[in-house]
Image: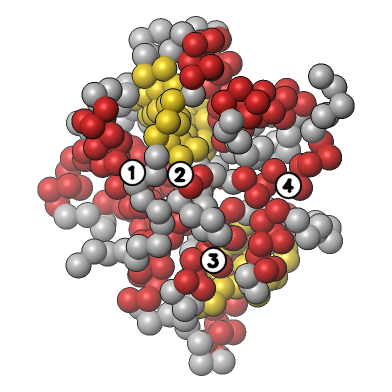
């Protein structure tokens, strides 16, 4: 029996970005993990399929997780939970009274139980806060299951191993071979899963490039390794042996103003891509990662690269709270 629940729309489509490919003289394809669902859209649901299975197997009735006020992961967790009969408690980071918009609007619609904490509390004691919530639930006869930020732990990241199988199937079907996979890195689990999938199903042949949208490349190289080591505990011996900790490549320099903050060049880039390709990127992750890829290619950084697969990890609800930052009056 499979060790996951199945709620995501899989496999996700792959399509070519024609104009930007022509401009940069390289083939850029995009894997539409933004279309894994509607309420559950984005990359987090692949991880949640595994985390939630473990929650159910352990007899838990409530998911407890955390994130920023516009967390895609938190929103996906609530929606996924409802679909399998679990309630959710969200611990969301905000220093002010939040606007009811984007993901936070969806959280409200889905009836999530929401607790706000400050960014200081989030950095220093979010785990402790979630543990306390779990204890309180227990006193009321309920059983909580804590999912860490982004579901980026050993179990969650298993969700991105299967991604590599989908890539392989597509390559065989269409007769193309991707040399590079590009993904945004926010808590590291997606990168970790794709790296494992590369080792298990793609002969480790692909270059996996991550663009970090917060912290630093070194921070994530370390974090990704730790997640992979944790994931190995869930794999059989043979598969575990096939996974290495080599060639983890995270590119720094595109965090911009900071996590979830946008500057004008990034938003213009998102706007242009929308006009040219009919594809909408999000401002917090994919917008920055694609902007990073574009700039690195412009600088002629990846000379050997021919066929790139960019992972659209979702996040579209995050655009709405940014609506007033787009300068639509300018041409
Ligand atoms: C969380 C998220 C990411 C980053 O994935 P991690 O596994 O946290 O590194 C990328 N894109 C979107 C839209 C996300 O919500």
Establish if 41 lies above or below 326: below
Task: Reply above or below: 320 against 40.
Answer: above
Indicate the quadrant where residue 93 lies.
Answer: bottom right
Q: CA distance from mark 3 to mark 4?
A: 19 Å
Task: Name above or below for residue 11 compared with residue 207.
Answer: below
Which residue occupies 37% across, 24% down?
Answer: 180
Dot 1 or dot 4: first in sequence order is 1
What residue lies at 26% left-to-right and 56% top-to-bottom? 233
Disc 2 vs disc 1: Cβ atoms closer than 8 Å?
yes
Residue for point 45% across, 51% down:
36
Please, what secondary structure does the residue beneath circle 2 have? helix
According to the picture, the residue beneath numbered tag 2 turns out to be: 33
Mark 2 / mark 4, whichever is N-terminal: 2
In the rendered image, which residue does mark 3 sit on?
A: 79
Q: Where, quadrant-wise, is the C terminus in this rendering?
A: top right
Asked whether mark 1 lies closer than 8 Å to ligand 1, one says no
Nearest the viewer among 177 and 301 is 177
Q: Quadrant of residue 181?
A: top left
Mark 4 highlights which residue?
Answer: 320
Identify the image quadrant of the N terminus: bottom left
Residue 100 located left or right of residue 252:
right
Is residue 132 visible to us here?
no
Q: Position of residue 163 (x, y in %)?
A: 33, 43
User: What residue does disc 1 label?
Assistant: 163
| Camera-side residue of 146 and 173 | 173
Horizontal side of residue 279 vs 206, given as left or right: right
Residue 265: which numbered mark, if any?
A: none
Disc 1 to disc 4: CB gap under 8 Å: no
Q: Is residue 205 above or below residue 57?
A: above
């Amino acid at each position: 029996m499979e060790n996951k629940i199945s709620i995501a729309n899989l496999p996700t489509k792959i399509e070519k970005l024609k104009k930007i490919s022509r401009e940069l003289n390289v083939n850029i394809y995009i894997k539409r993990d933004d279309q894994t669902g509607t309420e559950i859209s984005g990359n987090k649901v692949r991880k949640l399929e595994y985390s939630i299975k473990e929650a159910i197997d352990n007899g838990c009735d409530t998911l407890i997780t955390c994130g920023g006020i516009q967390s895609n992961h938190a929103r996906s967790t609530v929606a996924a939970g409802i679909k399998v009969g679990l309630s959710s408690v969200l611990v969301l980071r905000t220093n002010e009274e939040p606007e009811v918009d984007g993901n936070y609007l969806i959280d409200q619609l889905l009836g999530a139980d929401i607790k706000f904490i400050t960014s200081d509390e989030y950095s220093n004691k979010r785990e402790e806060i979630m543990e306390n919530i779990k204890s309180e639930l227990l006193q009321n006869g309920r059983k909580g299951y804590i999912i860490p930020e982004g579901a980026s732990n050993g179990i969650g990241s298993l969700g991105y191993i299967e991604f590599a199988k989908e890539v392989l199937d597509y390559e065989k079907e269409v007769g193309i071979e991707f040399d590079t996979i590009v993904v945004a890195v926010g808590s590291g689990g997606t990168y970790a899963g794709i790296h494992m999938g590369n080792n298990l199903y793609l002969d480790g042949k692909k270059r996996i490039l991550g663009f970090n949208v917060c912290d630093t490349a070194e921070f994530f190289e370390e974090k990704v390794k730790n997640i992979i080591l944790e994931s190995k505990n869930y794999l059989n011996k043979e598969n575990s042996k096939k996974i290495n900790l080599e060639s983890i490549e995270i590119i720094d320099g595109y965090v911009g103003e900071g996590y979830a903050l946008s500057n004008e060049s990034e938003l213009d880039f998102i706007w242009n891509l929308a006009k040219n390709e009919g594809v909408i990127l999000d401002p917090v992750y994919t917008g920055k990662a694609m902007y990073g890829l574009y700039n690195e290619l412009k600088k002629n950084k990846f000379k050997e690269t021919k066929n790139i697969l960019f992972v659209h990890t979702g996040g579209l609800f995050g655009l709405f709270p940014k609506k007033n930052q787009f300068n639509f009056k300018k041409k």
